[in-house]
Image (cartoon, coloured by chain):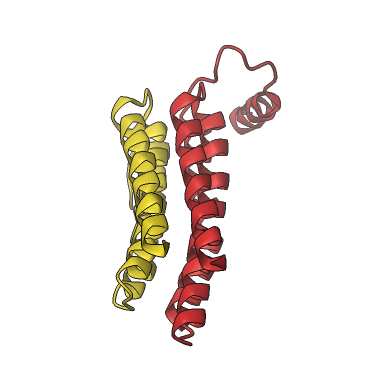
Amino acid sequence: MFEILMIVALSLLSIAILLNIYRAVKGPSGADRVLALDAIGINLIAGSAVLSVLLHTHAFLDLILLVGILSFIGTIAFARFVERGVVIERKR
Amino acid sequence: MIPALFILFGVSMSLIGAIGLTRLPDVYTRSHAASKSATLGVLCTLIGTLLYFLISEGYFSIRLILGIFFVFLTSPVASHMIIRAAYRSRVPMAETSVQDDLQEYMRKKAGQAER
């Protein structure tokens, strides 16, 4: 019963990721794409949590923190790139 | 059974956010759908995972608590940064939107900078 519920949760998450990929491919502006990629990262965090419940293991719990940090840094870098055209500003 | 309810609620919140991200008209309303519901969804899912390991094995995961705290802290910040960049690079609003209060302020500020 529990495993069936977890498999249903994983399928719903994969449907959500597919919808986000549609927006990331189609999105009219760059900000739409960055927004969709950020949502994909957050859904991947939820997916790894559900997978670790399904497989009864603690091994994927590190992955949650790692994917969270990487997704946040990537989103901030892309936001700066959309706003100013450069990622790292050099002041002289 | 409680962890399964938490996880299913969180996952359906993520799905609702993704549907909103697909169907809403412009980038600002899409951000409204994506950031709020995705944050609530992933928080409920992670709390369900924490409760599952706590109930079934008696294992309290500090890493999971750190992950919950970090996602709760950074996800609204990231969404705010993206939307600020979108407004400043003049991504157009939907044609059905009726009010833009920030535009006058930005114009006044640009006028002050020229003077």
Query: In front: B99, or A40?
Result: A40
A24 vs B14, left or right, is left
Residue A34 picture location, percent across and down: 37, 40
The image quadrant that residue B96 belongs to is: top right
Query: In front: B2, or A41?
Result: B2
Check the picture and name the quadrant holding the C terminus of chain B: top right
Residue A82 picture location, percent across and down: 38, 37
The image quadrant that residue B97 belongs to is: top right
B35 vs A79, left or right, is right
Apparent colour of chain B: red
Residue drawn at point x = 52 percent, y = 67 percent: B3
Residue A28 picture location, percent across and down: 37, 22
Residue B11 picture location, percent across and down: 47, 50
Apparent colour of chain A: yellow
Note whether residue A72 is visible: no
Note whether residue B23 is visible: yes
Query: In front: B62, or B7?
Result: B7
Q: Count the marks: how many?
A: 0
Is residue A34 placed above or below A41 in the rendered structure?
above
Residue drawn at point x = 67 percent, y = 29 percent: B102
